[in-house]
Amino acid sequence: MTNPHRDTETSDFPKLAKPAQRALAAAGYSRLEQLAEVSETELKQLHGMGPKAIEQLRQALAVKGLLFATDG
């Protein structure tokens, strides 16, 4: 059963602090798979993205067998 009050674009991100959620949304990210194409350095440059959020995302990616992109 779907929730009609839920946003049509769903995110599979772990529960993150609001500033990190806003930073990802503003940058156009809504799926973990998208973050596998982004380096940690790039994410850290987003206003609101802190070390705790990066670690939470790293762990969520690992569960799916994914990693952040390498800096290069």
Image (cartoon, helix red, strand yellow):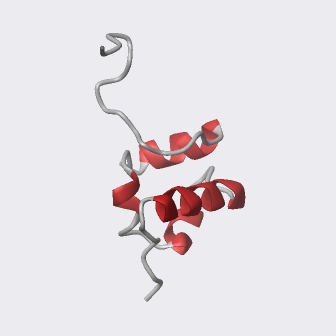
Instruction: Identify which residue, 30 or 62, lies in the foreground.
Output: 62
Marks counted in the figure total 0
15 in relation to 68, above or below: above
| Residue closest to the far bottom | 72
Q: Position of residue 46 (x, y in %)?
A: 55, 58
Q: Quadrant of the N terminus?
A: top left
Q: Is 9 on the left-hand or right-hand side of 48?
A: left
Q: Is 30 on the left-hand or right-hand side of 15?
A: left
Q: Is 43 on the left-hand or right-hand side of 72?
A: right
Q: Residue at x 34, y 58 (%)?
A: 34
2 in relation to 62, above or below: above
24 in relation to 4, above or below: below
Q: Is 33 on the left-hand or right-hand side of 56?
A: left
Quarter where residue 66 is shown:
bottom left
Q: Position of residue 18 (x, y in %)?
A: 62, 36
Quarter where residue 14 is shown:
top right
| Residue closest to the far top | 4
Instruction: Identify which residue, 51 or 15, lies in the foreground.
Output: 15
Q: Residue at x 40, y 54 (%)?
A: 32
Q: Residue at x 35, y 33 (%)?
A: 10
Q: Residue at x 43, y 44 (%)?
A: 26
Asked whether the viewer can see residue 45, the reply is no
Q: Quadrant of the C terminus?
A: bottom left
Asked whether the viewer can see residue 2, the reply is yes
Quarter where residue 44 is shown:
bottom right
Q: Position of residue 69 (x, y in %)?
A: 42, 76
